[in-house]
Amino acid sequence: MGLFDLWREARGSVMRQELEDIMLRVRNANESATRAYFNNIYQTIGPLKEMYGNASTGERKALMKQSRKSADQMWSSGDWPSSLGLGISLLNVESEYVPGDEAAFVKVETDKIIAEAAAKFE
């Protein structure tokens, strides 16, 4: 296993911590906030998966950077439910391409959340 592989597996551990943080923040959200959270997931997951899957490594980095910037702007403007929803979509997309057990855990858990979001809006 090379150094790059070790870094990517370590990224999985960070992703798991990010997922746990989001889940703690969403846990006690009211109905309106929960709806905005799931709506953002429902609206963003398809386009993000398509763009990320078709992108080069450099394009993927740029997409993640811009998307995280958007999430930060949502958070700063008070739209924290949408910010957290975008966070779930980003974790799901990235976890598909990161090796290791932690990333696999994030993928499985975010897939469940995405299915829940889809069930609410389809």
Image (tube, rainbow, N blue to C red):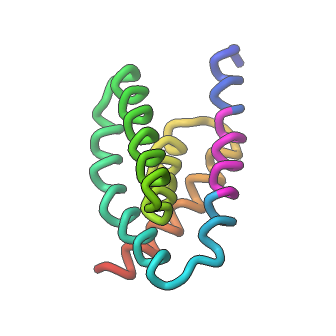
* In this rendering, position of residue 42 left or right of residue 14: left
Q: Which of 100 and 65 is in front in this view?
A: 65
Q: Nearer the viewer, residue 33 or 41?
A: 33
The quadrant where residue 117 appears: bottom left
* In this rendering, position of residue 52 left or right of residue 26: left
Residue at the image point whose x is 60% and y is 70% from the top:
26
Give the residues drawn in magenta, as a range.
Answer: 11-21
Say whether residue 68 is magenta: no
The quadrant where residue 42 appears: bottom left
Vertical placement of 33 versus 65: above or below?
Answer: below
Q: Position of residue 33 (x, y in %)?
A: 48, 75
Q: Where is residue 106 in the image (x, y as percent from the top left)?
A: 61, 53
The quadrant where residue 51 appears: top left
Q: Where is residue 99 in the image (x, y as percent from the top left)?
A: 61, 36
Residue at the image point whose x is 37% and y is 63% from the top:
40
Q: In which quarter of the image is the N terminus?
A: top right
